[in-house]
Amino acid sequence: MIADKSYDSKDLRARLRKRGIRPNIPTDERRKRQTPKRGRPIKTRPSYRQRYKVERCFGWMDNCRRLVVRYERLVHLYKAFCVVAIILWCVNAILK
């Protein structure tokens, strides 16, 4: 599981390991700093970089209002519109 440092807690890490899930959460430094540390956390595994792809996909989904607001109550209709949105993104990428 890849998550932000806002999810960093010993309890969450223990529950994930108990289920056999390997957490990839950067540690949140508990001590107070005079100036906050900026940028991407240093102490992460290489798989943390994959998180960018997920965040980028969420950004693309924000362009489709129907998916953001979720007008459909039925799951199969929502999934169908997700597929249509992905097809449109792929076609736009090919045509560029």
Image (cartoon, rainbow, N blue to C red):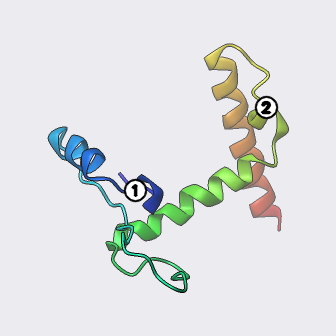
Residue at the far bottom: name it. Answer: 35
Up/down of 4 relative to 12, above or below = below
Q: Which residue is mark 1?
A: 2
> Which residue is at the front of the view, 8 or 82?
8
Task: Judge from the rendering whether residue 54 lies leftward or rightward of residue 60; answer left or right.
Answer: left
- Tell me the quarter of the picture where residue 59 sits: bottom right
Front-most of residues 72 and 30: 30
Circles 2, 1 touching at the beta carbon (< 8 Å): no
| SS for dot 1 | loop
Q: Which numbered tag is attached to residue 19?
A: none
Mark 1: give few (<14), some (14-19) or many (20+) Cα within 10 Å.
some
- Tell me if residue 96 comes above or below residue 32 in the rendering: above
Between residue 80 and residue 27, name the one nearer to us: 27
Q: Which residue is mark 2?
A: 69
Residue 38, given in percent of the width and then of the height, sits at 55, 82
Q: Is residue 42 left or right of residue 40?
A: left
Mark 2–mark 1 distance (CA, rounded to whole Å): 25 Å
Measured as percent of width and height from the top left, residue 17 is found at 18, 46
- Residue count near mark 2 (Cα–Cα under 10 Å), binned few <14, some 14–19, many ≥20: few
Horizontal side, residue 34 vs residue 75: left or right: left
Q: Position of residue 9 (x, y in %)?
A: 32, 53
